[in-house]
Image (spheres, grey):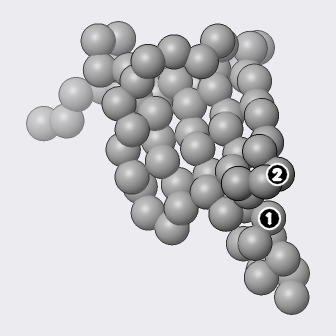
Amino acid sequence: MEAAMKILESTEDVRWEYDAEADVLYVSVGDPRPATGVDIGEGAVARYDEENNELVGVTLIGLRARLLEGLG
C-alpha cells in the first residue's frame, strides 16, 4: 500500500524562477528548502520533502527548447 503524499494542498505561496541561460524553470511551494530530487522523466525533477512527506517543488529542464519544439 502506498503512503499518502501531500501535493500542492495550498497554492497560496507558489514561487518560481526561470534561469534563461540554463533554460531551467524552478517552481517551489513556499521558500525553497532542502529536498530530495526525484527524476520523473523528460527533464522534470520533483523535489520531495521526505520528513514531511510532501512535494515542495518541481524543476523543469530545457523548458524553452521543449516549448519551441512543441509549437514548431
Position of 61 with respect to 56 (left or right) is right
The residue depicted at 76 percent of the width and 31 percent of the height is 16
For residue 57, what is the image quadrant? top right
**SS for callout 2:** loop
* Kind of residue at badge 1: Arg
Give coordinates of residue 28: x percent, y percent. 63, 26
| Element carrying mark 1 | helix
Instruction: Say if 61 sits above or below 11 in the image.
Output: below
Q: Earlier in the sequence, mark 2 or mark 1?
A: 2
Say whether residue 10 is visible: no
Q: Amino acid at mark 2?
A: Ala
Outermost residue, front side: 21
For residue 41, above or below residue 6: below
- On residue 56, the disc is none
Label drawn at residue 64:
1
Q: Which residue is mark 2?
A: 20
Question: Can you say whether 61 is above or below 58 in the image?
Answer: below
Task: Please name the residue shown 35% across and 11% down the image.
Answer: 52
- Say whether marks 2 and 1 touch (CB < 8 Å): yes
Residue 16 can be seen, yes or no: yes
In the figure, is residue 71 to the left or right of 69?
Answer: right
**Toward which corner of the image does residue 69 lie, by quadrant?**
bottom right
